[in-house]
Image (cartoon, coloured by chain):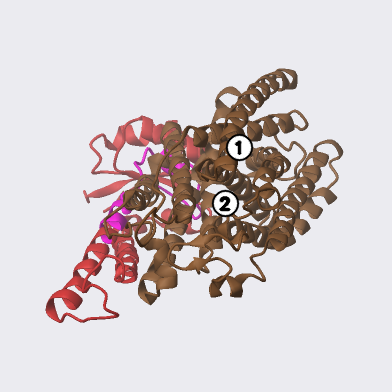
Amino acid sequence: MTEKYGIIASFPDTPSFFHAAEKVRDAGYKKWDTYSSFPVHGMPEAQGQARSKVPVFTFLGGITGFTVGLLMVWWMNAYDYPLIIRGQPFFSPVFPFPIMYELTILLAAFGTLGGMFITNLLPQHYSPLFNSDQFLEVSGDRLVIAIEARDGQYDVVATRQFLEEIGGTDIEEVSA
Amino acid sequence: MSSDTINSKGSQVGLIALVVGIVGIVIALFGFKQGWDTGEVRPIMSWLIALGFWLSIAIGMLFLVQIWYVFHARWPTIIRRQCEHFMAAFPYLLVLFLPLLAIPFLHENPGLLWKWMDGHNELPGHGTVAEDPLYAWKSPFLNIQFFAIRAIGIFAVFIGVATLLRKWSFDMDTTGNINNMHNARRLSSLGLFLTAIAMTLGSIDWFKSLEYHWFSTMYGVWFFAACMRAALASIIILTVVLAYKGYLKGILKQAHRYDIACMMLAFTVFWAYISFSQYFLIYSANIPEETFWYNIREKNFDGGLNSWWWVSMGLIFGHFLTPFLLLLWYKTKVVIWRTVGVSIWILSFHLLDLYWNIIPGKLVAPDHGAGYLVRQFSVSIYDLAALVGIGGICIFAMCRSMKKAEPIPIRDPNILTSINYTE
């Protein structure tokens, strides 16, 4: 028997799709996801997802940029090659502020982009879900919930029955 | 809750505010009179600071309402009505401005508060105002007659735009005539320019001209940023109070608070950007006519640090860095007590910002020796009295307006979108 990736179930309309997601969440499944071709408002909460970790990456990127800008100007203007400009101090937090500020923004943006890739597990060119012809219709009008085999609560018979109970149709096991 | 209970509650609060306001104003005017008689100007500055504080909130709300109209914003419709109520304070603020306007016309030293108004006033180390070439250049703008005309024009814009917007919005409740919305939107697109010009002139006349030697093209924008921050923080406090005890219960959603808090974050950064740019350009150019303004806010004539240095640091870390870092957190923007806490924090530092801009402005010559004395940071009982007094009158005006109209604009075409608003 080939290894299985998980079970997918389709739902006829957005409300039943949304409430089914809440039931999967309440049943205690962890490794599962919802798939639709359009965003469904409130779905992250219905899936029981915690808030995104991307802001942490943004913040760390920003702090790094600020510090790098500060050290860079200090090293260049006050340490490596001291320059007298307008008779003002070699180093002060005032005049290099645009540089600190620009680097804060730049590295915060890089942090955001990198954090988005890391938390979304990108780049990901292949998913076993593409083995299912039904799943490919998600880019059309199909609404799918997929529960993965690596979930601790996963059981071929019980999970299939559960998906049926919460209103899923076209239930299919997807091979890995 | 029926509208009768709302009205009786509103009138109770309004009555209390009126009584407290009158008591505060009597005490503050007593200080004003002392300043008038003795020539010691600090209690008169209390009045100016308090007036600036409450005026900035009302101006910020006037801006927000017009911006929302111009951009056809749907979500803030329920908040717009609360701003319209607060904007009823403008005519009262004009009356409360009159004591200051009386100084150049009725006092024996017209330059008691704004020293350029009297040519005999001495500038430490520079002779008198009349002999000052900088004043001679600026006198076509800075003269008493034009100052008075501008003051009346500025208030005419605020009162005119606010009155029309209020009238049309309230009329919409009863008649449902969509032309009210079109009128408000048309007026707002012109009114934003008028309000911006009036606000800029006001900040230059009333605050910046205390040190008329100074140059800064950033000053009007600084006051704009300050007004917006004050207004947004006040909106949070006002709407949360109304949602807790009053008629916004169940109507004000997390999404509304979240969006206002996002704007608070944006304007915190904007205020820092403007304030820093002003400092940065003057620091880089290093011209004495400009740097002195920051010098007196850092050092005494002998070069030692003065109390304003601490206030300046307080503004950098307290008015920018702390609210900035706190508002980055999602939780700060959605947990009610945290948002309200940051709002109170911002309003307090906004007041400190006004102190910092207004009080050191009038240098005094020392009894003997060269140089000048910087008026140090202090908090007086008259500051508190003027703040509570003028604030009481503003809240009275708001409560009085709340009795005249529905709690939310019930027949506004966007009201449903606003009530059902989600993040």
Q: In the rendered view, would you say B197 is above or below B351?
A: below
| Residue drawn where x is 63% and y is 49% of the image | B59
Q: For the residue labelled by badge 1, is the local secondary structure a helix, a strand or a loop?
A: helix
- Which residue occupies the extreme front position in the image? B368
From the viewer's perspective, tell me whether residue A69 is left or right of residue B250.
left
Q: CA distance from mark 2 to mark 1?
A: 13 Å
**Letter of the red chain:** A
Residue B333 occupies quadrant:
top left
Q: Label 1 belongs to which residue?
A: B33
Q: Is residue A42 magenta?
A: yes
Tint applied to chain B in the drawing: brown
From the viewer's perspective, tell me whether residue B83 is left or right of residue B211.
right
Q: Looking at the image, do the residues carrying marks 2 and 1 touch, with CB atoms under 8 Å apart?
A: no
Q: In the rendered view, would you say B336 is above or below A32?
A: above
- For the residue marked with disc 1, what is the amino acid? Lys
- For the residue marked with disc 2, what is the amino acid? Leu
Q: Is residue B118 magenta?
A: no
The region drawn magenta spans A34-61
Q: Chain of mark 1?
A: B
